[in-house]
Image (spheres, rainbow, N blue to C red):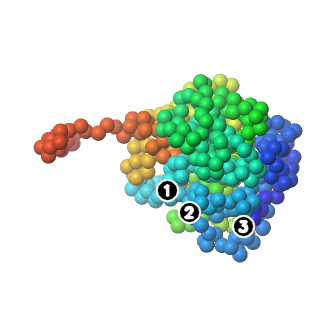
Amino acid sequence: MASCVTGLTCIHCDSSFPAAALVKAEGVWMTCPKCGPADGILDIHYDLDRVRAAWKSHPLAQRPLNHWRYAELLPLEPSAIRHDWSVGWTPVIDAGRLACELGIRQVLLKDEGRNPTASFKDRASSVGVAHALQVGARTIACASTGNAASSLAGHAALAGLPAYIFVPATAPEPKLAQLLVFGASVFAVQSSYDAAYDLCSQTCQGFGWYNRNCAINPVLVEGKKTAGLEVAEQCASFGGVPDWVAVSVGDGCTIAGIWKGLKQMHELGVIDRLPRLLAAQAKHVQPVAYALEHAELPKDGTGTTIADSIDVQVPRNWRKAVQAIREAEGVVVTASDEAILDAIRLAGKHGVFAEPAAAASLAAVVSAIDSKIIGPNDRVLVMITGSGLKDTKNAIRAGGRPITIEPSVAAVQHVLSDSRKGAKTQS
Ligand SMILES: *Cc1c(COP(=O)(O)O)cnc(C)c1O
């Protein structure tokens, strides 16, 4: 299963670079040397005819159920593929009762919380760490709102590489706990995610560390892309391509990656049409919504959200995200913190435990139904990007407290009859 990479191009100036650039530890593959790290983001290209031929002689149906099944569409040498780090092929849940409740034809929940460190970010980290090993990196680093960090720490631990992590000091404790247990060195930066990001980039440049940040490292986006490849393959069991794929947006790499995967599967003939994208942002942190309209980022931005994973005022990949949303005839829908807490409860009632940023995509779907962007005949797939165990404080805010009782059946009876009375007086 050899990689079918043909080369890289700069999304800003369109310059091309050979695939060989990907196997140098230091070099042009990180960002375009002409445009620099702020603008010169690179995109990786593949020979899809070769992919098609490879999938014919070795069909996907016969491959392991993890994201390495798409090896031809990853920028890795065969020896770098690690089936033992099983990532992806997360379940798609057909939430029929939820579709009825919301009054649309179908709601599919793709539960990315089932990945090894409980978020979507494992798709990128696994590919990034495999690539770091391939190029002989000795240290790996990233800045993160939390999930990219815990997932990088987990995969670095699997690989035996030291990891340095820069997080905002406000990151939820369960995420910090995860990465500390995985043995990473953690810098809790006394500022925003945006500041942590800049500090990480400067440190990587200074010390020659492998930078796992998706926004500038094109290899990572290829890992995120596997979710789009999977959606294309899995939706065949649920009546075909959905009308909408809903994704929450922070830096914008996730939605851009998923779109790239969907497009490749369309070109490869695995799906016969493309869904529209529903991009979810927080009500007070919506720079991508602004950029979609104005083709630039807003100058100010001071709001915040409980959805820490998308609490990003300066999205590093906004251009790729905006381009994906445009191509997909997509829309951006924002969700308030209250709507996000409601969506955590809603997903929970249908068996899926979501962290706030993961529920934001469902909250956006609810709002898009209310405003008739999504119609009653539509079928929607919602990416639930991270587990509710990642942020137990907000999970409890959404779920409420238990009923404290004495250890007696009488006490249980008492509570039950009270709640029945309550139900009667309400009706
Ligand atoms: C990182 C993350 C996102 C957003 O991904 P971006 O690439 O930053 O847009 C959404 N949900 C969760 C749970 C995340 O960890």
Q: In the picture, residue 302 is in which quadrant?
A: top right
Q: Residue furthest front?
A: 160
Amino acid type, residue under disc 1 in the picture? Leu
Q: Residue furthest bottom?
A: 57
- Mark 1 is surrounded, within 10 Å at the Cα level, by few (under 14), some (14 to 19) or many (20 or more) other residues, namely many
Residue 199 vertical position relative to residue 413 in the rendered view, above or below? above
- 190 or 278: nearer the viewer: 190
Q: Which secondary structure lies at badge 2? A: helix
Task: Say if disc 2 is inside 8 Å of ligand 1.
Answer: no
Quadrant of the drawing holding the N terminus? bottom right
Q: Horizontally, is 367 left or right of 184 in the view?
A: left
Question: Would residue 232 be seen by someone viewing this image from the given angle?
Answer: no
Whether residues under marks 2 and 1 lie with C-beta atoms below 8 angstroms apart, the answer is yes
Report the residue marked by disc 1.
Answer: 108
Residue 125 placement (x, y as % from top left): 64, 48
Residue pictured at 81% horizontal, 43% vertical? 26
Disc 3 to disc 1, C-alpha distance? 31 Å
Disc ID at residue 1: 3
Q: Quadrant of ligand 1?
A: top right
Q: Horizontally, is 331 left or right of 351 in the view?
A: right
Disc 2 to disc 1, C-alpha distance? 9 Å
Disc 3 to disc 2, C-alpha distance? 24 Å
Q: Residue furthest left?
A: 410
Residue 178 vertical position relative to residue 237 in the rendered view, above or below? above
Question: Would residue 110 be seen by someone viewing this image from the given angle?
Answer: yes
Disc ID at residue 235: 2
- Mark 2 is surrounded, within 10 Å at the Cα level, by few (under 14), some (14 to 19) or many (20 or more) other residues, namely some
Residue pictured at 60% horizontal, 25% vertical? 191
Q: In the picture, residue 100 is in which quadrant?
A: bottom left
